[in-house]
Image: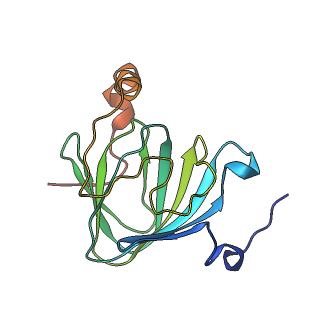
Amino acid sequence: MIVRSMDEVNDTDADIKTENWRSRRIVLAKEKVGFSFHETVLYAGTESTFWYANHIELVHCIEGEAELTNEETGEKHIITPGTLYLLNGHEKHTVRPKTDFRVLCVFNPRSPAVRSTTRTACTRWSSRRTSTPSPQARKARRERGPEFRAPLSRSQG
C-alpha cells in the first residue's frame, strides 16, 4: 500500500514547474502499478499545446475553467469542474485556462521516472513546438475509428 501526501511531493523532483503550469507527479513508474497519476495546475491566461505519442491521458477538472482545442479537428470544448476528457487517440491539443485550472491526470502506460528538466519523457510540447503523430499513433487512431473520439463535454463553436 502506498500512502502519500502532497507535502511529500512538493518541491521535489516530482514537482515540475514551468511558466505555464505546475505538475505534481504523485504516482510514477517506480511504483510499478501500470499507470501514473498527477495533479496539474495550468495558469490563467496561458496557452499550452500537448501531444503524447506513447500515452493515453485522462484529465478530470476539479477547479477552474479552460478552453480545450483538438488541434487535429479544430473542435473546441469548455472544461469546468466535474468534466473530464480522454485523449484516447493521441490527439494534439491546446489548453487555454480562463482561470487557474486544476486537473487530476492519469497516464497509461505510466510516465517514466521524473527528470529534472521541464520536458518529460512523455513528449509534452509547448505551443512553440510542432510535431506530427507517429505512424503507430496514426494507425491506432484509424483502427479505433471516429466513434472513440467523441467529445466528452459540450462543444463550443
Measuring from the top left, give residue 110's x and y in whole percent: 61, 45
Horizontal and vertical percent position of residue 3: 80, 66
Q: What residue is at 41 percent from the left and 24 percent from the top?
A: 136
Q: Residue furthest front?
A: 116
Frontmost residue, 118 versus 78: 118
Instruction: Give the camera-side residue of 85 and 135.
Output: 135
Colour convention = rainbow
Task: Give the image quarter of residue 45.
Answer: bottom left
Residue 29, relative to residue 156: is it above or below? Answer: above
Residue at point 66% right, 72% down?
A: 9
Q: Residue at x 18, y 46 (%)?
A: 74
Q: Is residue 134 above or below residue 100?
A: above
Provide residue 12's location: percent of width, then percent of height. Answer: 64, 73
**What residue is rendered at 49% in x and 50% in y?**
58
Q: Quadrant of the C terminus?
A: bottom left
Image quadrant in which you'd find residue 61: bottom left
User: Looking at the image, how many numbered discs can be counted on the residues?
Assistant: 0
On the image, the x and y values in percent for residue 78 come to 28, 62
| Quadrant that contains the N terminus | bottom right
Up-down relation of residue 79 to residue 134 (above or below) = below
Question: Horizontal placement of 154 versus 89: left or right?
Answer: left
Which residue is the extreme one toward the left?
Answer: 157
